[in-house]
Image: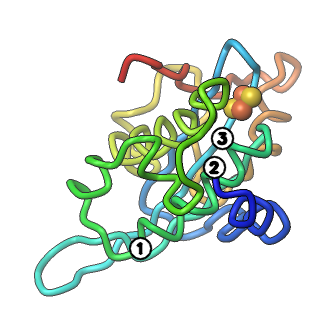
């Protein structure tokens, strides 16, 4: 792993924060370490193709997940859905280079959130399970977790990380 790039991504993570006008939102949790990551995506038309205009993220995750998400959200700009879907965890880390084996799942958390966002689309009624609070485009990860408490009568839709994907 490139230590200089890693430290830069941690000191100044790019594209952190919810996106109020997102077209797609994905939230993934890793049951093993308890970390979570949400990614927002906004598309635009370019030469008749739908490409990613910008992406952002929020994370209750480790530093490696934050560094990979920072790199990934930069890398996704200008890519089509198909191109984005073809990127695996190692590629999403970009110039971070190969992650240590014990940190591979941190990159997979980012890959999972990206795939979940690409699969679901924002606020699509067809993606919501009954009784599950919708992932509003502008809702922060923290606010959705607070609203998901039983006393608030809601549940948060979090996709468990599929490490076999
Ligand atoms: Fe859980 Fe890194 S330790 S995502």
Q: Quadrant of the C terminus?
A: top left
Rendering quarter of residue 141: top right
Residue 46 drawn at (x, y percent): 21, 84
Q: Are marks 2 and 1 in contact (CB under 8 Å)?
A: no
Give neighbour class at mark 3: few <14, some 14-19, many 20+ (Cα, 10 Å). Answer: many
Q: Is residue 25 left or right of residue 32?
A: left
Mark positioned earlier in the residue sequence (2 or 1): 2
Q: Tag 1's secondary structure? A: loop
Q: CA distance from mark 2 to mark 1?
A: 23 Å
Q: How is the image coloured?
A: rainbow
Q: CA distance from mark 3 to mark 2?
A: 21 Å
User: Is 126 above or below relative to 18?
Assistant: above
Label number found at residue 6: none
Mark positioned earlier in the residue sequence (3 or 1): 3
Q: Residue at x 67, y 14 (%)?
A: 31
Label number found at residue 37: 3
Give neighbour class at mark 1: few <14, some 14-19, many 20+ (Cα, 10 Å). Answer: some
Q: Is mark 3 within 8 Å of ligand 1?
A: yes
Q: Residue at x 53, y 22 (%)?
A: 161
Q: Are marks 3 and 2 in contact (CB under 8 Å)?
A: no
Residue 80 drawn at (x, y percent): 24, 65
Residue 150 drawn at (x, y percent): 82, 16
Report the mark closest to the observer, 2 or 1: 2
Label number found at residue 1: 2
Q: Is residue 34 left or right of residue 109?
A: right
Label number found at residue 77: 1
User: Is 115 above or below relative to 156?
Assistant: below
């Amino acid at each position: 792993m490139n230590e200089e790039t890693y430290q830069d991504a941690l000191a100044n993570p790019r594209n952190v924060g919810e996106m109020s006008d997102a077209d797609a939102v994905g939230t993934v949790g890793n049951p093993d370490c308890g970390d979570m990551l949400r990614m927002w995506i906004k598309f635009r038309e370019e030469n008749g193709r739908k490409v990613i205009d910008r992406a952002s993220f929020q994370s209750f995750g480790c530093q490696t997940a934050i560094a990979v998400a920072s790199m990934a959200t930069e890398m996704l700009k200008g890519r089509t859905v198909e191109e984005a879907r073809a990127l695996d965890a190692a590629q999403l880390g970009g110039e971070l280079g190969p992650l240590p084996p014990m940190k591979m799942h941190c990159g997979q958390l980012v890959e999972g959130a990206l795939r979940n966002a690409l699969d679901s689309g924002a606020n699509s009624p067809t993606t919501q399970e009954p009784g599950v609070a919708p992932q509003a485009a502008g809702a922060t990860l923290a606010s959705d977790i607070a609203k998901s408490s039983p006393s608030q009568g809601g549940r948060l839709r979090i996709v468990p990380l599929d490490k076999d994907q």
